[in-house]
Image (tube, grey):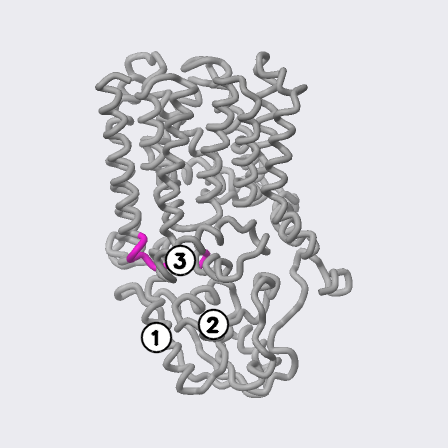
């Protein structure tokens, strides 16, 4: 390595460390999203699986809270720090596939300035560990290509297994890898080698806790998630959302470079065929499926997270390894020069907006209901009411409110979601005697909620109406009802909708 390459490597890692530090600071004062609060409740009752997802998000949160406590910072600590090994894997993969430090450094830096990586590792969801595992799947495959050693398939299997422990989207890695082996002639020998299949067994072994949990719970998690592929009607309304959302999540200039890189790879420019084929297979397998999926259902922007390590490498290839014509060269150069500043400004602006609302003049925006701004003060008021009326437990009707209540109310407070009990199957329920006294229901006021409560309790008394605020903006209003005299079970143990009617549902 030359002195200039060493300096480039050092400066790249200093920049990545600075970006990680910005995320850590932001994580400390940004309230949890409702999903994060929900996943935090998982971390208190670790299991091989959960109704919605495999367990990796819960494990990541548990490690962080063991270090920094049950705080916003603790919940997010490990997820943010995992961006460092993710960056290393992308750096090394790019260097292996395309040679040199320049593409490698650019790929690692561009990944870190995307909103998908910056926000995606700060707001802890299953997409964060999936994206990190994805980078190591790519690294293992690059080592298979460069060394020809079968043992690297075991590492690939381990990375795929960790990805499967994060989110079921990792199932697409199998078809992508198979496609790569088929389309690259020199790699077809692996199809008759035991090594890839041994790697598959490693992945299966790592994934086995999820299989075991699902087997014990009637395969509910698989049924729920794989059921998304069921086509009930066709529509073009969702496909138009894909490119605009990815344009923002990648940050505009990284998206432009990535799109240019994909075009270059498809037109056989920018590296050896096997390297191009790997990135194409990795990206297009997932992109094409979700494009098809969008024809009958909405595709959330974060679902594309596993392609982002490969997409960052493709963007770096566009910046450095393609002989563009003059106009395209200028576009690539401008995009590369301003990608990091624009990405950083977008991230900081998003954090400021989510916490204060100042950038829209304190009006509503997409973050206002999902980020728990105002919940610290709201929880203090709810606890004061609970203590005043002598309620033994606090009930809610949705998992987001339940998660926020569990996190922001004093630790040890009895908090339960009355319905959707499958979400809490890993958590022990309180003694029935505790539910026989006074209860406090927290929810948005509605006629349907009032009818449900009066049907199930002999006494329903409104005791407070509290507001969640972001500065001067009213986000939502919660009605607090004192409940007594349950006419049946306090908790609704109806089977999840995936099982249909109670007559056809499996028994508990």
Q: Secondary structure at mark 3?
A: helix
Determine the image quadrant of residue 320: top left
Q: Secondary structure at mark 2?
A: strand
Magenta stretch containing residue 34, yes or no? yes
**How far separated are the C-alphas under marks 3 and 1?**
22 Å
**Image location of residue 356, percent across then percent down:** 26, 58
Q: Looking at the image, which residue sits at the far right? A: 503
Q: Secondary structure at mark 1?
A: helix
Nearer the observer, 194 or 502? 194
Q: Dot 1: few (<14), some (14–19), or many (≥20) neighbours within 10 Å?
A: some
Among numbered discs 2 and 3, the one appearing first in the sequence = 3
Among numbered discs 3 and 1, the one appearing first in the sequence = 3
For label 1, the residue is 380
Compared to 220, does 96 lie above or below?
above
Q: Residue at x 31, y 26 (%)?
A: 105
Q: Residue at x 35, y 28 (%)?
A: 107
Residue 47 is tagged as none
Looking at the rendering, the stretch of residues picked out in magenta corresponds to 27-35
**Image location of residue 286, percent across then percent down:** 54, 33
Residue 443 is tagged as 2
* Nearer to us: label 3 or label 1: 3
For label 3, the residue is 65
* Nearer to us: label 2 or label 3: 3
**Image location of residue 490, percent across then percent down:** 60, 78
Among numbered discs 1 and 2, the one appearing first in the sequence = 1
**How far separated are the C-alphas under marks 2 and 3?**
28 Å
């Amino acid at each position: 390595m030359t002195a200039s390459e060493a300096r480039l490597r050092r400066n790249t890692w200093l920049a990545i460390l600075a970006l990680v530090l910005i995320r850590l600071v932001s994580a400390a004062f940004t309230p949890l999203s409702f999903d994060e609060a929900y996943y935090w409740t998982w971390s208190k009752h670790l299991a091989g699986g959960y109704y919605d997802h495999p367990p990796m998000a819960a494990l990541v949160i548990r490690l962080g809270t063991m270090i920094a406590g049950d705080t916003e910072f603790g919940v997010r600590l490990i997820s943010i720090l995992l961006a460092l090994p993710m960056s290393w894997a992308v750096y090394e993969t790019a260097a292996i596939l395309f040679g040199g430090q320049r593409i490698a450094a650019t790929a690692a830096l561009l990944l870190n300035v995307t909103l998908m990586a910056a926000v995606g590792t700060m707001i802890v969801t299953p997409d964060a560990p999936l994206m990190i595992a994805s980078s190591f799947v790519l690294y293992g495959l690059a080592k298979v290509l460069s060394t020809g050693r079968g043992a690297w398939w075991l590492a690939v299997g381990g990375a795929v297994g960790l990805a499967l422990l994060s989110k079921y989207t990792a199932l697409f890695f199998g078809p992508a890898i198979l496609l790569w082996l088929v389309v690259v002639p020199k790699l077809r020998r692996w199809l008759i080698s035991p090594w890839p299949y041994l790697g598959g067994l490693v992945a299966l072994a790592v994934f086995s806790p999820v299989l075991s949990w699902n087997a014990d719970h009637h395969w509910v998690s698989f049924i729920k998630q794989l059921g998304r592929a069921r086509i009930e009607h066709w529509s073009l309304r969702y496909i138009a959302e894909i490119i605009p959302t990815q344009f923002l999540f990648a940050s505009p200039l990284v998206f432009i470079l990535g799109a240019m890189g994909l075009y270059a790879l498809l037109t056989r420019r920018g590296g050896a065929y096997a390297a191009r084929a790997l990135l194409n297979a990795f990206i297009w397998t997932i992109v094409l499926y979700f494009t098809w999926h969008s024809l009958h259902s909405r595709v959330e922007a974060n679902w594309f997270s596993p392609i982002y390590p490969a997409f960052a490498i493709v963007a770096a290839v566009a910046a450095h390894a393609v002989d563009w014509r003059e106009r395209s060269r200028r576009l690539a150069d401008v995009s590369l020069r301003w990608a990091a500043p624009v990405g950083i400004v977008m991230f900081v602006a998003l954090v400021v907006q989510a916490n204060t609302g100042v950038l829209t003049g304190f009006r509503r925006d997409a973050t206002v209901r999902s980020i728990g701004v105002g919940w610290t003060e709201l929880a203090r008021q709810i606890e004061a009411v609970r203590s005043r009326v002598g309620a033994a437990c606090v009930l809610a009707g949705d998992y987001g409110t339940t998660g926020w209540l569990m996190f922001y109310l004093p630790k040890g407070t009895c908090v339960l979601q009355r319905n959707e009990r499958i979400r809490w199957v890993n958590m022990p329920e309180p003694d029935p005697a505790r539910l026989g006294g006074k209860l406090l229901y927290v929810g948005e006021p509605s006629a349907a909620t009032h009818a449900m409560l009066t049907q199930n309790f002999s006494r329903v008394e409104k005791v407070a109406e509290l507001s969640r605020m972001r500065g001067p903006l009213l986000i939502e209003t919660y009605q607090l009802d004192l409940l007594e005299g349950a006419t049946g079970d306090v908790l609704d143990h109806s089977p999840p909708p995936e099982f249909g009617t109670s007559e056809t549902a499996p028994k508990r």
